Amino acid sequence: MNKLDRVMVNITWKCNLGNCSYCWHHVSSGSLHVADGSVRVAPDLNVEQWLEIFHKMDPAIIDFVGGEPFVYDDFIALCEKLPNKHTYALTTNLMSDRIEEFTTKIKPDNWIIINGSYHKNSGLSVEEFAKIILKFQGAGFPVAVNIINHVSYENMLNDWEKFLKSKGLKVFISPYEDPFSLQSRRTPATLVCKAGITHYVINNNGDVHRCLSWFRYLIGLSKKEDGKICIYDKRGYMGNLLKETFAKVKREKSCELYCDLKYLISPENSLISDVNIREKSLWGWIKRPIVKRKK
Ligand code: SF4
């Protein structure tokens, strides 16, 4: 069987917290703040539009993120109708009064993980948080907890981790990185991966980008309609799945961005474990044809 694509779906940019100091995706005045600027936020697609998209996609592990997926108005109605050809995952802050309804109505069969992100500013104690994530587990969903290793959590992180583990929960501590200076602090390296081929990101309006890093950084050269070169690469844009303009990238491309998946997200994360990011070897450069100077 072919390996499944890995697809991150930013189903909505709206969030019911919106005040995490380490958040990559603050929205204000209709714009989403990314590493080097802002992007206008389009309205969310409706359930029928998402179903049309999911039916036409190659089989994938679809990871619902955002924003907060439970803030998407019809999230449960959508989950009830998801096609069986995909496998699903969810990253949520658990701040929703619709969790009971989700665990009652949705069958866990096609779900590989419910990832609870703990944010202290949610007002939930870690004990309250554990009770909620264990409700998913009790309903048959595999679960895990993710916490950002932010300086404001310094004195509490160990105790939280210990407590959550004592409840039998898997805990991932993600390193904190300042979203606005990563690109300037990245390890200088040319990377190669299958972004756009076997993994990609879909935004709330059906737009597809190679990966989150490409979406977040306005970098590169491209031609405008008038033929002039400008510094704008459309953020690794691959078309829109609803408008039939989406096409997968045909072959691996070099990449010099700060890579979330390589440098930030835990390699133990099953969603990215076989994304296969490599540094372009020196050998690749040595093999380039050597042009002899004319005498
Ligand atoms: S190496 Fe990382 S940043 Fe670059 S395209 Fe691949 S996933 Fe994206």
Image (tube, rainbow, N blue to C red):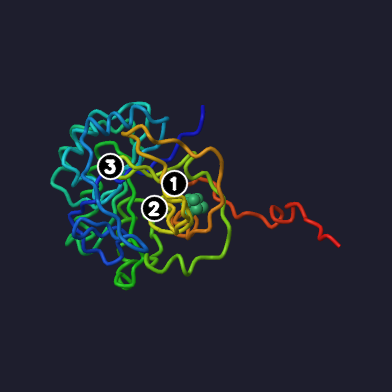
Q: Quadrant of the C terminus?
A: bottom right
Give the Cα distance between marks 3 and 2: 14 Å
- Contact (CB < 8 A) between labels 2 and 1? yes
Q: Nearer the viewer, residue 273 or 187?
A: 187
Residue found 55% across the figure and 47% down from its top? 253
Ligand 1 near label 1 (Cβ, under 8 Å)? yes
**Residue 84's x, y, as percent?**
34, 26
Residue 205, disc: 3
Mark 3 to mark 1 CA distance (whole Å): 15 Å
Mark 2 vs 1, N-terminal side: 1
User: Is the residue under label 2 in contact with that under label 3 (CB below 8 Å)?
Assistant: no
Of residue 273 and residue 30, the one placed in the foreground of this image is 30
Which residue extends farthest right? 295
Q: Earlier in the sequence, mark 3 or mark 2?
A: 3
> At 21% from the left edge and 53% from the top edge, which residue is drawn?
15
Q: In the rendered view, tell whether residue 31 sits above or below residue 46.
A: below
Q: Tell me residue 279's x, y (percent).
A: 60, 55
Q: Which residue is mark 1?
A: 210
The answer for how far apart the CA atoms under marks 2 and 1 are is: 7 Å
* Secondary element at image label 2: helix
Where's residue 252, x and y in %? Answer: 56, 44
Q: What residue sits right under mark 2 in the picture?
A: 215
* Amino acid type at mark 3: Asn
The relative height of residue 149 versus residue 237 in the rendered view (above or below) is: below
| Disc 1 element | loop
What kind of residue is marked 2? Phe
Q: Quadrant of residue 113?
A: top left
Q: Pick out the residue farthest to the left.
A: 97
What type is the residue that disc 1 sits on? Arg
